[in-house]
Amino acid sequence: MPGIPSPFSDDDGDDAAETFDEYDEFVPDHLPEPGAFLDGHDVLAGDDHLDFHDLTRDLFEERGVYDMTFGYNLARLNLDTRHPSAGYRYAVETDGGDAPAAADRAVLRAEFTPTTEFCPQSDTLVRGSFRAWNGLADRHEYDLVRVRVDGVHHNSEEINEDMRQLEETFLETDSVTRVSDDSGGPGESTPGREGSGRGPTSPF
């Protein structure tokens, strides 16, 4: 139908201007509040946030990090005015945090707030985000991007424990290709818990 943008594209029609902010607009009211994972660190705002998030769009596009519910690049969730409390916030780690092995690295923290507390994609999306940011680290200034899901998600503790393990493996190997999540490959359907990134819909 004319005037309705395709959910599989970043091409904006007339209606999209009302639904999505632009990538060069920093609108705090349309972004999640920084949560516990970013507390005490230098939260990115203004141009700093916009620059990293614009790069994120490119990295997510290259690695296929898409929200399958809405059918768009996950970076676009930050711009979706229908979900003003969902998306990513970032902070530069200031004190080495709780990962001693990362103490001598330039570290960015990324915290994902899902659209609902029961979002079944949260595990898959943060894993895909981790792989995109750290697998294409030559495209940004950080040696490590640490990723967590906000505590609003009902399964955040289990998801974040998995992310800590992925992070440790990455720090040991310095390669995301050796970070295993037991995912089935394309076209495979591997049994596993809900939201684990297993099965044919996982693009990572």
Image (tube, rainbow, N blue to C red):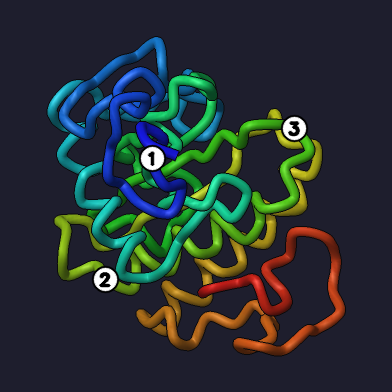
Mark number displayed over residue 5: 1
Q: Where, by quadrant of the figure, is residue 129 drawn?
A: bottom left
Category of crowding for the residue at label 3, using alpha-carbon neighbours closer than 10 angstroms: few (below 14), some (14–19), many (at least 20): some
* Mark closer to the chain start, 2 or 3: 3
**Residues under labels 1 and 2: Cα distance?**
29 Å
Which residue is rendered at x = 52% and y = 52% of the image?
71
Q: Which residue is mark 3?
A: 117
* Mark closer to the chain start, 1 or 2: 1
Which residue is rendered at x = 24% and y = 20% of the image?
26
Q: Are marks 3 and 1 in contact (CB under 8 Å)?
A: no
Q: Nearer the viewer, residue 61 or 171?
A: 61
Mark number displayed over residue 136: 2
Vertical comparison of 155 with 36: above or below: below
Pinpoint residue 53: horizontal percent, then vertical percent. 26, 42
Pinpoint residue 73: horizontal percent, then vertical percent. 41, 52
Category of crowding for the residue at label 2, using alpha-carbon neighbours closer than 10 angstroms: few (below 14), some (14–19), many (at least 20): some
**Residues under labels 3 and 1: Cα distance?**
27 Å
Q: Are marks 2 and 3 in contact (CB under 8 Å)?
A: no
